[in-house]
Amino acid sequence: MSAALKNPLSEPLPLRERPAVPLPGPSDWSFELIEQYHKVIRDTADRFGLDTYPNQLEIITAEQMMDAYASVGMPVNYRHWSYGKEFIATEKNYKRGHMGLAYEIVINSNPCISYLMEENTMAMQALVIAHAAYGHNSFFKGNYLFRMWTDAASIIDYLVYAKNYVAECEERHGLDAVESFLDSCHALQNHGVDRYRRPSRKSLAQELAERKDREAYAQAQVNDMWRTLPKRAEKAEESSGTRRFPEEPQENLLYFIEKNAPLLEPWQREIVRIVRKVAQYFYPQRQTQVMNEGWATFWHHKLLNQMYDDGFLTDGVMIEWLKSHTNVVYQPPVGHKAYSGINPYALGFAMYTDLKRICEEPTDEDRQWFPEIAGTPWLPALDQAMRNYKDESFVGQFLSPKLMRELRMFAIVDDEKQEELEVSAIHDESGYKRVRESLARQYDLGSREPNIQVWNVNLRGDRSLTLRHFQHNNRPLHDTANEVLKHVARLWGFGVQLESVNAAGDVSKRWSLPGPAV
Amino acid sequence: MALQSIIDRRLAGKNKSVGNRERFLRRHKEQVREAVKRAIDGRSIRDVERGEEVHIPKKDLSEPVFGHGSGGIREVVHPGNKDFIRGDRIERPKGGGGQGSGKGEASDSGEGEDDFVFSLSKEEFMQVFFEDLALPNLVRTQLAETPEWKSQRAGYSSDGTPNNLHVVRSMRGAIGRRIAIGAGSRAEVRALEEELDELLAGPKNPLVLERIKELQAAVAALRVRIARIPYLDPIDLRYRSRIRVPVPTSKAVMFCLMDISGSMDEARKDLSKRFFILLYLFLTRHYEKIDLVFIRHHTQAQEVNEDDFFHARETGGTVVSSALVLMEEIIRERYSPSEWNIYGAQASDGDNWHHDSGRCRELLSEKLLPLCRYYAYVQVAEEEQNLWDEYAQLPPLHAHFAMRKATSADQIYPVFRDLFKKEGAKAA
């Protein structure tokens, strides 16, 4: 993480030596073969200047893949029933053949761990190595969100700690107490991330050392905040409305609860913290799906093709990985029965490929739309496009008119006040900007997930907590809001209100829950 | 270059999700128990030991999070435009699901009314079943385990431990290999020697002498090669192969006797069924072949198949002795006590024609109990009846007769306590 940025190459380095014969391409892999392939892939990646964490390839069984799959892709995690549910569902789909397992899971850690499934053929292993160990890996190391928000070196240690801590709590406070508490935290985990402020980065040792102090300190703080109650109660009238708490609305609900919920025990605060940390770790992944998958797909495509051109791969191997590559980047058109939105692999792959084209063979249109990169070397241009964007800004910046035409993109407005949907823009001269902006907005987490903030705590009265939902385009909350609110009330310990505020600033809907019975 | 490594994890950390699965089952215990109960009602006694599918309504599994509902204004970009142009108006698709297609999230929180279905493994199924019956842990492991094993010879294999080395077989293999590998060389030697003999017998000139020397050298070389064939090679080794086979001892017959008069309602029958299942499970651990005989009775007894046994219902009075008489007849005809281990399990609500109860006791005491290994009686009702009183005189005289009142599943086990204890001690 601390390593200085490697300057991107402007040209791929030349091939050192053409091999006499291609690498063997049997369907069964062996350790020696993986080593051989890996070496060639690594050398090829080096020629393109891909900067990665060290790689650790691990061979696992399909069952272990499902294990990892079920616990949010991590090799260790604390125990919770929802992961069991996930596992059962995954296993069922897999056994029925509804779903191939993901070819790969790769963990944003240092060293970067990529799982290779035992059942894969050699060609597939090569694909996975190029995709995960070089594509995703370099993305994790390079992209600004990952650099800023996650700490690849310590995540595994932290999860081991979390697992042991939760197990310890289960032993001490009972399975039921821990389970229902985790349920509540999970309900809010999407709202347990800092969006703008960088979290402090600590080693596990620091975490552990600070935990004890933190417990004592946090409790003292909480007590302090509430201690002023009786004195102020007399002057309630005068001070009401003068002091707000929190002074500014807060977007990180879990953080607010961890620090301020009056009744939580120290172990409960620690669990809130764990859930919050894990959510924060995954936050960049949720914002860079198109970029991350697109980048990895672009690179496995580029690397393996390069290897073929250099004489390392046989035709058989090529055909095999190309087949699954084609499946992965398939984008069914709207109305097709397989259509379920835009395939991030397809869009990302198409965009990076298109960027490379813009650099190498720009048209007049490209020069007009992308004056700063058209005709420049493609490696630095792609490198920049990988490092400094997230999905929203990436689409907003780099989706080209040509690609919009190719994918035949169009935007539809759904306004509940109108009888019918309206096509607001299509892939033509007057629509490019609108389609691109609209698609970019679609990838903005801020508009995908409801914006809910801690608004106020009634310090002098019933201690109730008020949350505010700021509507985006007047979109209301889903009916599950009431269920989630029950979880909030359980965490907060007193009554909870939720107000949904529309664009005009009026509260259009209000939920209210009394505090849980003690 | 940084360190690169490949690690084989296949043997490490299998079943990491077991803990999560346990928590999942624990959370949905009610549904699981319900499923097990239904399965037991529907299954044949012989068929109890397998997994079962559990259905859980999706809404019970949801993990709510804040999300957007339908409404407001939203703009979604789709690929694959066919012929729309700007300003076109499209009819709103029916149903909430369709319009969400742009979100690209496979919603499992969605409206799908399907249940979440998963299978309990056989072990998990039995665990729940045993929990209902309140079986002590020792008995649970005893029942859950497959019985004793004995190892049995099963031919030869090419790998094994040195103490199982079969010398004769190995040597035989070695001879065969030596013959086979040396065959070519030996044939050549023979041919060369024949030629040599001819030459030696014939007239000699320098050319012939030269040839003779050549031949002698060739023969010598071949003999060296033959001698170099190893006497014993690792591939010759054969080991006695042993496999483990379960050792159920022999044959047993289990008589299920049940009162099906009007007063036996479904709940009581269900209780009786569990009682029979438990005995059956016990027997499967100890006997290779088990016959089941179902005798139902009201005023008359008849032998029926399992389905009729549990599901038919008749009304009328009750004469328990009729079943006992029939049981004795069947034993005499088909199950000679010298060949069969006979077990009896009788379930009734205790209702009997009052002149008959004494006769029942006599029948049991004099005719049946001497033939049986164990006889258990469960009264699935609370009231004291004369049959109970009569039977109550039996236990002091016959150690292998047990009786018990049970009004819920967890009260069944104690009737077998002595049986399990005895066998458990033997097995331990």
Image (cartoon, coloured by chain):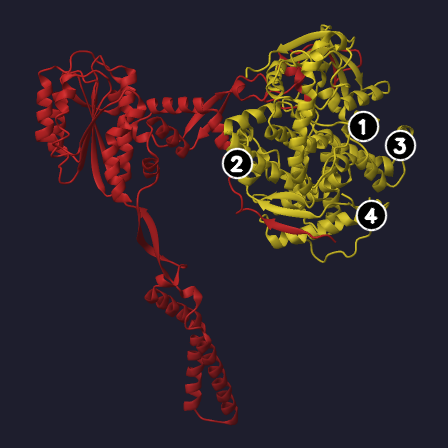
Going by the numbered disc 3, the residue's amino acid type is Thr
Residue tagged 3: A363
Tell me, yes or no, whether dots 4 and 2 are on the same chain: no
Mark 4 → mark 2, Cα distance in angstroms:
44 Å
Q: Nearer the viewer, mark 1 or mark 4?
A: 1
Write down the chain letter for disc 2. B
Q: Position of residue B417 (x, y in %)?
A: 25, 33
Write down the chain letter for disc 4. A
Element type at mark 3: loop
Going by the numbered disc 4, the residue's amino acid type is Pro
Residue tagged 1: A393
Q: Which mark is residue B171?
A: none
Query: Measuring 85% from the left and 45% from the top, which residue is drawn there?
Result: A7
Residue tagged 2: B17
Hue used for the chain lettered A: yellow
- Whether residues under marks 4 and 2 lie with C-beta atoms below 8 angstroms apart, the answer is no
Element type at mark 2: loop
Q: Position of residue A155 (x, y in %)?
A: 67, 39
> Which quadrant would residue B82 be assigned to in this image?
top right
Element type at mark 4: loop
Query: Measuring 33% from the left and 41% from the top, which residue is drawn there?
Result: B146
Q: Do we see residue A334 in this rendering?
A: no
